[in-house]
Image (cartoon, rainbow, N blue to C red):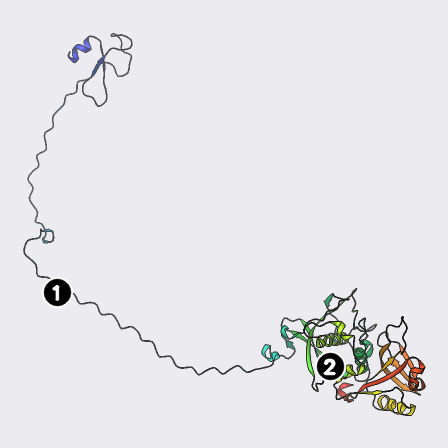
Amino acid sequence: MTQQSQIEKGQEVRYHKGIGEPRMGKGKFGPTSSPGPRTGIAPIKKRIALKPREEEPSEKLPVPDQFQPETSQKKTPSPPRPAPKMPPLPQKRPQKKQPPTPPPETLPAIAQTTEDPGIIPDSRLTKNPVSQVFPKLRATKAPLFHGPVRRNQARQGAMGNCWLMAPLAAIAYTRPGFIQNKLCSELQTVQGERAFKVNLYPGAAKKQESLFVDAHLPHSGGKLPLAHPGIGQKAVWAAIVEKAVAAHLRPAAPQYSDTRKGAGLTGHKLIAGQDFAKSRNLYKQPSAVVHDLLNKIINDNDYPTTVTRIIPNPDANEKNPEHEYVVDDYEDEILYLYDQRDGTYVEFTLEQICKGKKSGKYLKYINWCELPDDPEDS
């Protein structure tokens, strides 16, 4: 059936995209009506066969030689190019032999740190002594010296080291310049902390040896419980010397308790040196000998002097059967003693001194140090 006859009978002609011939079929609503999409008379497309385009003859261009095919003839190889010449590498200059450095000079520890002798390294500071009763240490801000040196600046504390504190107070009483010029001085560390230098005569040494301590001292209730200045005084030189002595007695593990035991003569030797420290026994001596000795030591030369008082039969309430006093004066056969613990005075007549044990409390030893009365030390 031709396409024209199909259209005349009212049949639906469906077109499919990409298909040349139509597909016949009945519509949904009968042969006379066709509401479906793409219905009706389809135009007849006439196919026209296209002829291939005849190319016009073109003139052939000459092909360059570099694109010509290789022929069987062998070309003579070109000579190789010479390699570029590299500049010569710079040669290293021979190093001059430097003279050997001399070994460093062995200088004192202070000179190695700084040229200022008033500054020391922390490594030269001794260990801080420990007190089991007063373990708290605090850096004191009190001055080392405040005003003239006085004996009431060397008050004995709770440690009971009268053998050390009495000679200190005696020297401060008659040779105050020795304390300030030769015994101790103030320095500082590299970090700017306070430090102190104390010169002592340890053992049998005839030359002073320096110990360096810092400003940390035992505190209790805001006060110094051990060596301390008296009422109205601010200088702490006695506390610094006490600390240095504790560090000297046991350098590895210093303790303040090591300063409890000692004799008055030991204190004079440690501070002034064994060449100046002297001692005599007052026990069972004639009164004339004792009288001349006291006049020579105290009145004629005014040497720093201490005496050792002994209680032969102390009772249970007596805490200090042996104590070292500072000699204050000797006048009219009466010996006046100063107690550095509380600043009080004790008197002994010449008769009591010569009786010895018969008078109860008696004086056994007299100790002094023959320091020169130099104008710089007074």
Name the quadrant containing residue 267: bottom right
Q: Amino acid at mark 2?
A: Leu
- Residue neighbourhood size for the residue with mark 2, other residues' Cα within 10 Å, grouped as few (<14), some (14–19), many (≥20): some
**Disc 2 to disc 1, how far (Cα)?**
101 Å
Residue 91 visible to an observer of this rendering: yes
Residue at the image position 29 percent from the left and 72 percent from the top: 89
Q: Position of residue 78 (x, y in %)?
A: 11, 63
User: Of the numbered discs in the image, which one, if any, rests on residue 36?
Assistant: none
Horizontal side, residue 329 vs residue 237: left or right: right
Tag of residue 183: 2
The front one of 56 and 296 is 296
Q: Residue under circle 1?
A: 79
Q: Quadrant of the C terminus?
A: bottom right
Q: Position of residue 238 (x, y in %)?
A: 77, 76
Q: Which residue corresponds to the image point at 22% horizontal and 70% vertical from the top-left?
A: 85
Q: Can residue 148 be seen in this snapshot? A: no
- Quarter-wise, where is residue 319 in the image? bottom right
Decide if residue 30 is on the left or right side of residue 284. Answer: left
| Location of residue 167 by image quarter | bottom right
> Is mark 2 in CB contact (under 8 Å) with mark 1?
no
